[in-house]
Image (tube, helix red, strand yellow):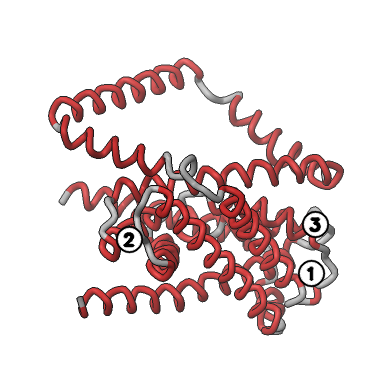
Amino acid sequence: MTFDLKTALKYIILFLIGVGVLYLAFRGQDLGQIWEEIKGADFFWILASSVAVWVAHVLRALRWQMLYQSIHYKVGFWSAYHAVIIGYLANLALPRFGEIGRCSVIHKAEKVPMFASIGTVITERLFDVLVLFITSLAMLIFQYDIVSDFLYHTIYLNLVEKLSKVNYLWLIVIGALVTALIIAAIYFLRQKFSKKFLRIFVALRQGFGSYSKLKRKGLFLAYTLGIWIFYSLSMYFAFSSIPATSGLHFNAAFTAIVFSGFAMAAPVQGGIGVFHWMVAQSLVLYGISFKDGLAYSTIIHSSQVLLILVLGSLSLGLILTKRVKE
């Protein structure tokens, strides 16, 4: 019961942090004017943006299905697709819970061991992190004159100021204690649950090795590239939804998707607050006012959340109906 209370408190705190960032982002802004911009948005381009995001989700399901096939698990496309969408739905409630949630869906629907699924998800996420790193590097190389000032004044100087206040001795002590606890926990688990621990390790290793066993690595990489292209297209299409951002080019969408990638990595439900601030900041680099950037980020974030709520509820209903029939 205590564990449940602690877990609930943790997620409530994370949610409140997101709301706090959202408040700080909108504080001092003309909310009435922002709302007028949102109300007057062109629905066609919002729909086009949502379709682009949906295509990215489909590509993610196809890519994940390939990893299962490489380790000899027959996971159907629709099972993978519904699991991905339900995972995003779960992330709106509990950050990072979606990864476990979609593995659970596959376990129930296709009888794939949980830890084998977790291994494939970690493998998949590593490629996403790699793409985010490469795109960030490309942004720095090709748009250095645009992003350098933001990185120096907003990121670097603030980071240096915070690090100057850190007590490194305490940091080393805490790091050593955490390392010792992890080693002790692994040793305890191996001693008490040696056979079960071995099965978990084998299943995880099977999932981790899924990419190396792929026969069509080129297709996997094409799906990975396609996911990020369609995410960028969703940003680009949404530019045309309001007059303030309609003149922006694809390079601005490229930068916005990099900023949003780091925002969505934050352990906050649906990236609320952090996403709005980061995307708005990315558009400021291209001469868009922070207020207009907030209007844009609110439109695209809300449309994506609505998409997941609709598609996620539909997928969840279909999966539950399927299980009831079985």
Q: Residue furthest top?
A: 169
Is residue 92 among what the camera can see? no
> At 44% from the left edge and 18% from the top edge, which residue is drawn?
172
Image-based side of 147 in relation to 124, left or right: right
Marks 3 and 1: which is nearer the front? 3
Which badge, 2 or 1, comes first in the chain's sequence?
2
**Number of callouts:** 3
> At 37% from the left edge and 55% from the top edge, which residue is drawn?
97
Residue at disc 2, secondary structure? helix
Residue 263, percent across and down? 58, 52
In this rendering, the answer to whether 162 lies above or below 290 is: above
Do the residues bearing badges 3 and 2 touch, measured as CB atoms within 8 Å? no
Using a 10 Å C-alpha cutoff, classify the residue at mark 3 as few (fewer than 14 neighbours), some (14 to 19) or many (20 or more): some
Marks 2 and 1: which is nearer the front? 2
Q: Amino acid at mark 3?
A: Asn
Image-based side of 27 in relation to 181, left or right: right
Q: CA distance from mark 3 to mark 2?
A: 37 Å
Residue nearest the viewer, comparing 257 with 109? 109
> At 27% from the left edge and 77% from the top edge, which residue is drawn?
322
Where residue 12 sits, quadrant-wise, is bottom left
Residue 280, percent across and down? 69, 59
Residue 260, percent across and down? 62, 55
Q: Which residue is mark 3?
A: 251
Using a 10 Å C-alpha cutoff, classify the residue at mark 2 as few (fewer than 14 neighbours), some (14 to 19) or many (20 or more): many
Q: Which residue is mark 2?
A: 106
Q: In the rendered structure, find residue 245 and report the number of the disc placed on it.
A: 1
Locate the C terminus by quadrant: bottom left
Residue at disc 3, secondary structure? helix
Residue nearest the viewer, comparing 172 with 137? 137
Q: Amino acid at mark 1?
A: Thr
Q: In the rendered structure, find residue 227 and report the number of the disc placed on it.
A: none
Q: CA distance from mark 2 to mark 1?
A: 40 Å
